[in-house]
Amino acid sequence: MSEYKALIGLEMHCEISETNTKVFSSAENSYKDTANVNIQPVDMGFPGTLPVVNKEAVKMALKASMILGCTLPTHIYFERKNYYYPDLPKGYQITQETKPAPVGSYGALTYDCKGETKTVRINNIHLEEDAASSDHYGTFSTIDYNRAGVPLLELVTEPDFRSADEAVSFLETMRSIYQYAGISEADSRKGQVRCDVNVSIMEADKDENDPKNWGTKIEVKNVNSFGGVREAINYEIERQIDLKESGKYDEMEQQTRRWDEDTMSTIFMRSKVDAIDYKYFVEPNIPKFKLSEEWLESIRKEIPELASDRKHKYITIFGLSEYDATVIVKEKSISDFYEDVVALGADAKKAANWLTSVILGYLNKNDLTITEIYLTPKMLYEIMNLVESGKISSKQSKDILTHVLEDKKDPIQLVKELGMEQISDDKTIREIVIKVLDEHPDLIEDHRKGKNTFDFFVGQVMKATRGKANPSLTADIIREEIDKR
Ligand code: ADP
Ligand code: MG
């Protein structure tokens, strides 16, 4: 690789999951396991039906565009991209192609890759409709039109990534932005995020800012997971270097390939000469409309605190380590949970510890998200309080948490049920201490002579209270009572 460097550009498709309805129809926009239940005639391309623009979807698209620092258009209009496929019953996709139509042009995003700050230029971001989804079985295929017309954001970067790591870090940052901004869950498992990956290689010592030095671009279509993006990029870089080394690179044409999960390789689909002519033209059924300054301003005001803002706050105000802050903001649901615990009055550092150690460990082990478990921010706050007020020991608090998660019971009820409440009143503990000391005058003598019998006394008190005596209070009282004798 040292002789070559890779140029990588991404086309990231992300469904907008947070609108109630689809982008041009009143059908419900929600992920469903049952096929063909979220459909209106317009999604099926029935003659005589007309699209109606979903204002919420446009608003979310503009929000994404603003976050990426893109130039906004003065007007919104859509275009038809004409092609036929069974998942596209109208025979065209409504999208935004030619500038200045897209909701965003020429922006940039700064992101973190393995501790280094990187910037990628955004060519454009546009709003379009998703196609239906098809599933292929041995001898037949099925089509699910639930996805037809779901709002989709397509973001196109310049070829600014130099490695698979950079491309994946960028995708993770974008996913977080979509989640924090309330635009999309951006859940790959639900097929909400799909990428086309463009890869070329060039001589390492040539100037990458001059497109004349760029190699032949290979596009890999429809990569459905971030892991797949990483594999596909690394596979292509190696494949292209092999072609260079064997002298076959120069005859390679610009081509479209697809990522094949089963063979972990890219497979040839079509060459540039077979490129489809989509015959774009302005969508005549959707009137062009002007964006008012007031509307844009109100959208701008709605942009919430993003992961990078929260991370900064956690480090500078809450005093968390860079590592803990990064771990907590990674998933919005975790960060929201954390914000709630702190808002209830919990110590920010201790709450972070609970999350990063015990709770995230449990979620990872059981492949769950924080919204899927019984524990609420209030319950975590209660557990932390039980320890703070000395009612239970910190070891017991871990047991309580395990019970909350596994038995789905509230912490305060569990402390009672499990008889865990610590004995913290002086009188009760003192009575037991006096009794223990009375029974072992010889050991008090040994203690005075410097032998360690102290732990024995503590152990006896614990035995008498079945481990419930507050340990530090017990130690203090034993010391006092020995001194009195
Ligand atoms: P096309 O006209 O084939 O769609 P574009 O120039 O619009 O190509 O670019 C599509 C994507 O390919 C963008 O993400 C862009 O960054 C990327 N790209 C363009 N040229 C290269 C290259 N030489 N190597 C890698 N990626 C590239
Ligand atoms: Mg496209």
Image: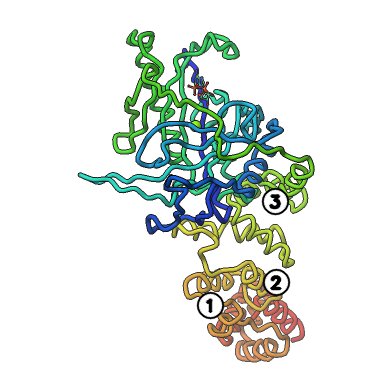
Q: Going from the N terminus, do you reach mark 1 or mark 3 first?
A: 3
Quarter holding the C terminus is bottom right
Residue at the farthest front position: 48
With respect to residue 242, does 361 lie above or below?
below
* Residue 42 makes an appearance in the image: yes
Residue 3: x percent and y percent? 47, 12
Q: Nearer the viewer, residue 278 or 345?
A: 278
At numbered mark 2, what does the secondary structure look like: helix, strand or loop? helix
Q: Amino acid at mark 1?
A: Lys
Q: Amino acid at mark 3?
A: Leu
Residue 181: x percent and y percent? 65, 48
Q: Nearer the viewer, residue 230 or 132?
A: 132
Q: Going from the N terminus, do you reach mark 3 or mark 2 first?
A: 3
Q: Quadrant of residue 434?
A: bottom right
Quarter holding the N terminus is top left
Could you give the CA–CA distance between mark 1 and mark 3, rounded to whole angstroms? 30 Å
The label on residue 21 is none
With respect to residue 461, does 237 lie above or below?
above
Q: Quadrant of residue 427?
A: bottom right
The residue located at (46%, 17%) in the rendering is 201
Is the residue under label 1 in contact with that under label 2 (CB below 8 Å)? no
Could you give the CA–CA distance between mark 3 and mark 2, rounded to whole angstroms? 20 Å
| Residue position marked by numbered label 2 in the rendering | 388
The residue located at (60%, 14%) in the rendering is 209
The residue located at (53%, 42%) in the rendering is 152
| Residue position marked by numbered label 1 in the rendering | 409
At numbered mark 3, what does the secondary structure look like: helix, strand or loop? loop
At numbered mark 1, what does the secondary structure look like: helix, strand or loop? loop
Q: Nearer the viewer, mark 1 or mark 3?
A: 1
